[in-house]
Amino acid sequence: MIIEQILQALMYPFLFMSMYFQIFLLYSYFENQKKIKDEEGRQVTQYPTVTIAVPCWNEEATLAGTLDSLLNLNYPKDKLSIIIVDDGSKDKTYSIAEEYEKKYPDTIHAITKENGGKHTAVNLALSKSTSELFGCLDADSFVDTNALLTIVSYFEHHPDAKAVTPCIHIRNPRTLIQRMQAIEYLMGVFMRKAFGQLDAIQVTPGPFSIFKREVFDVIGSYRKAHNTEDYEITLRMHKAHLKVMNSHKALVYTVGPATAKGYFYQRLRWARGFLENSLDYRDMFFKKEYGNFGMFTLPVAFLFVFYGLFAIIFAVYSVLSHYVDVLTRWMTIGIHPRIPDFDLFYVNTTVFSFVVMVMLTLFLLVIYIGTILSDDKQELYRNFPVYFFIYPFFVPLFLGRAVFDTLTKRKNEWVLQDTKK
């Protein structure tokens, strides 16, 4: 059919671009593998002062664990300051913060304010800080004992580094939705490291990205930024030519949404924030002065959102067409069950199927490298099948909604806080 031929013709560029993108990142990783290995185990000789902001909104269930993990950091306590900012919680969050402040008055400081969004909470902590380094840890995340020490080593050995991002995993995935996210985050371990070698990291995530204080003197504080302040501040850093690096051994564990509803709203917020912030910084697209980030990472990621939606539509159309043909044949000649057999002669050897198989192989390689980079010990044999069969159903939902909301300029105040129940 002519429609199918047109759809296939449009799919080929997407498939080849996707394959090129994966190969490009893998080449970057393998080319810099020795340098990446050398980053591990570096000694720290100087201990700069560090402030960690913990913005909270109704986090009574996880705040104590988050603070305990920070207090257990392998870092001089006289160099560490923790500022808890309660952003108008309705539960016992601030009471817990006060208890920790009384118990650790030299390290922990608790502040409460009216609800205004995460960016206002972090900015308040920033205004109270005089440390050389400043970072943020979401109140549902937990840091490994050596996470801060590992990140600080990057600043010491790379004087031009202005921010360092951690290696994030899902903490104790139990539900199917969390197991799916575990694979997502494992892919992110590789992607962030590969982008780091290209000076093209896309986001400094909320869980424990650490900045030099001078960054905020140059580009200013956090902004509302379509409810994705961590992505927008990274765009601003790239625009100001400030270097962002990744520490693949600085382990941070975050509690992912446990339900389909919570996951959908979180990813919708991320996807829409990505689209709207990218449009705000569209003057960086394909500009050499912004390096690999402007020439490659940012514009390709933006275009892939729309091509990805098209790929999903094509896949749905192909599946439906196949079963319509099967149903038509059954109605014409009846059903003739037989024992299935396998013959290599009938294996699909088209270019399209070959490219898909190559991409799947590269995808598995990316997951494997992610486990090696971060020493991840999760149950891949249980998590990967969940990701493979469930994730494709979510992508068109939150991407499609994000594109629609962005194009129609629909208000998105309802995603100020993620639904985690």
Image (cartoon, grey):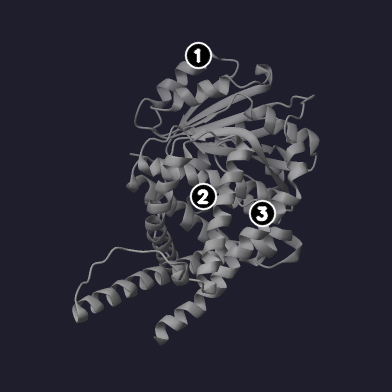
What is the quadrant of residue 318 in the picture?
bottom left
Which of the marked residues, 3 or 2, is nearer the chain's N terminus? 3
Residue 26, label in figure: 3
Assign a secondary structure to mark 2.
loop
* Viewer-side residue, 340 vs 293: 340
Contact (CB < 8 A) between labels 1 and 2? no
Circle 2 Cα neighbour tier, 10 Å, few/some/many (<14 / 14–19 / ≥20): many
| Mark 3 to mark 2 CA distance (whole Å) | 28 Å
Report whether 122 appears left or right of 247. Answer: left
The residue that label 2 is drawn on is 228
- Estimate the x, y position of residue 243 in percent, counting from the top left: 73, 47
Q: Amino acid at mark 3?
A: Leu
Looking at this view, name the residue that lies furthest to the top: 103
328 sits left or right of 219 in the view: left
421 up-or-down from 79: above or below: below
**Disc nearest the viewer among 1 and 2:** 2
Question: Which-is-in-front pick, marks 1 and 3?
Answer: 3
Residue 108 visible (yes or no): yes
* Mark before the other along the chain sequence, 1 or 2: 1
The residue labelled by disc 1 is 102
Q: Residue at x 41, y 87 (%)?
A: 2
Report the amino acid beneath label 2. Answer: Thr
Residue 241: image x %, image y %?
74, 53
Of badges 3 and 2, nearer the viewer stands 3
Which residue is pictured at 63% across the width and 54% down the height? 235
